[in-house]
Amino acid sequence: MIEKIKELLNEETTKKLSLDNFKDVLKIKTSSEFKELVKSLNNLTKEAIIIENKNHEYSLTKNTNYIVGHLDLKEKGFGFVIPLDTQGDDVFISRDAVNGAMNLDKVLVYVSRNRSGTRPEGEIRRVIERKYTHIIGTLQYRDGMGYLISDDKTIKQNIIIRKENYHGAKKFDKVRAEIINYAYKGKIECSVSEVIGNINSKGVDILSKILKYDIDPIFSDKVKQAAAQFTKVNDEDYIGRRDLRNEMIITIDGDDSKDFDDAVIVKKLKNGNYTLGVSIADVSYYVTKDSILDIEAYKRGTSVYLPGTVVPMLPVNLSNNICSLVPNEDRLTITCEMEIDQNGKVIKYEIYPSVIKSYKRMTYSKINKIFNGDKDLNNEYIDLVEMFYDMRNLAKILKKKRETVGSINFETDEAYIILDDQGKAVDVVLRERGISENIVEEFMLKANQVVAEHVYWLNLPFIYRVHDKPTEQKLHRLLKMSSALGYQVKGKTEISNLELQKLLANVKDTPAEKGINLLMLRSMQKAIYSEQNIGHYGLAFEFYTHFTSPIRRYPDLIVHRLLREYLFKNNQSTKTIEYYQEVMPEIAHQASETERKAVLLEREVVDMKKAEYITKYINKVFDGIISSVTGFGLYVTLPNTVEGLVHISELRDDYYVYDENLMILIGERKHRIFRIGDKVKVKVMNTHISDGDIDFKIM
């Protein structure tokens, strides 16, 4: 019945039909048929697939002034609805037109007009589906009633909690509260479902952020029990594997890493070529399809790395023990072994199941010190030093090869937050990136590329890491900005990777370097996972996937599972192919969504800790660089990556106007210009730690 209704409303002659019209056209005569019709119309209306007008006529929503989408609500109270139909424009929703909807809700919007002839403007008429069922916040009392101060500043309504719904929570406790009424006399009514702890207790700030993103920091007993059954490598586990235990295969990770899922070896051949072996923990051997561990890993999608803690995708027994490539222990792996010539071309390769015994656990810092002439470390690892230099040479070759095809290398700074015993941020420093980090990055990129291309030519269902080219609008802004700074880029509606790479090379070590890097980074689309291979624009790779981190990323686990199925078991049956064709789009979507959520959480926690750290420097002056310019002010980044806002109201020496095309603020009288990349001195005025906001003032 539902399909018949949609078909009728899609016809040119019957785009509007009343209930009586439907009865006549569908020749409905019995009461049961009539009930089914009414039920179907109600369900379609509820899902906003169809709309009923004031004359009680039904139309397909897509044929009306209504759209369905998800609300992106801003802290100022206004928002934008992103249509489910990705071809449509975002619709501006003013603060008065939100009508009780919350951030990320699925909503029905009446599109009324185009605001100033640019972006469509509308009003939310109905919430179709709520995104959030809980709110994280701090409990306060007022007039015998509990009030929740939400961590989510997009929520403007008062949030009340009755005394009987405190459930043990006390004043100043951070709590997770279930929403029991979204619209109680203009307020949201909640009931405490979990007491996280007093706002001043160690770790409560980070835990509240984790719960805000609906990430479970604890594994269930059943999941932990499922992981606990794997304690050692058994005799049957070696069957069908190539034995690499006598090879000098090593892991290279950070000083504080605990899960080692990749190991490498490089050999210089007599013909001048190199053999590169990349062995990755065979997590898929333990985490099998549809098992409780697989379901848990799919749900989490990724490990989340936060200052002082990690929320792993898999229980510790797997991530830090049986799957971790610790030294001097037999571990099951999948190896991609490649012969690479002096031009960076892969001459031949093999992908096979293996068993290794890591020869040494190396760290980035130790190898970097060896390259920098540390004699003590050189002597300690004398048997590996020659291989380190072969690794460095091969990595240079691979990087040069990438650059010749237009692979873009962004120079971005990453912060490392140092915490004290109470979990408070005491310092923010730049995470050092040396030669060894680049070596590992080049090796992983090459292994990912080879695996992706191998499966692509088999024409089998697969999951790719893809990166679409920038939009014309974003490229136009980049061109305008670079031109204003004196750097010309060839191209109008489309720019080659090589041109962007050339631009980055031209601005290197100039005052414009930071600004152009940031703007180019923001011009890029987001990399996602997809069952469709469209290539990776940023890397300039035609084929790319994620194969090298199955302990902490679900897509990598899927790639391993597919390699086992297609290559090692030689199972390319119609049934297998049809199964993965059906499930791969959803797996790719889930992986992209969980990654996006993890990135947002990581950014929010890091910003919070940066604000916590800088609080002790109120009224202190720092040198910084303008990292963004907007209509309401400019953002300034300090050398250690701490970023704050200089609100336009604090620019009191002139009246400043924002030029959107050039992304500059320009004074009307004195003509002083603020642009991305400018060096400035700022004073720390205020911080809002929970929100991760910092207020600066130009000096």
Image (tube, rainbow, N blue to C red):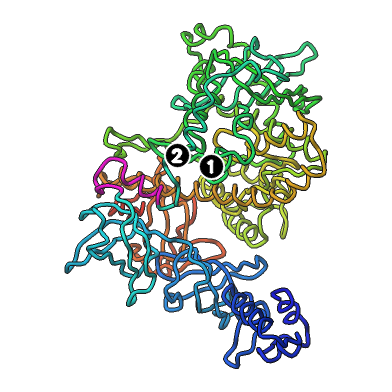
Indicate the amino acid at tag 1.
Glu
Give the distance between the C-alpha atoms of the residues marked 2 and 1, in whole angstroms: 9 Å
In this rendering, the answer to whether 99 lies above or below 52 is above
Which residue range is magenta in the image? 196-211
Q: Secondary structure at mark 2?
A: loop
Q: Which numbered circle lies on residue 219? A: 2
Coordinates of residue 80 in the picture (x, y in percent): 52, 69
Label 1 neighbourhood size at 10 Å, few (<14), some (14-19), many (20+)?
some
Q: Residue 647: give its label.
A: none
Look at the image and say whether residue 209 sits in the magenta stretch: yes
Q: Which residue is mark 1?
A: 296
Q: Is the residue under label 1 in contact with that under label 2 (CB below 8 Å)?
A: yes
- The residue depicted at 17 percent of the width and 69 percent of the height is 143
Q: Amino acid at mark 2?
A: Phe
Q: Quadrant of residue 91?
A: bottom right
Q: Secondary structure at mark 1?
A: helix
Q: Decide: is 250 above or below 631.
A: above
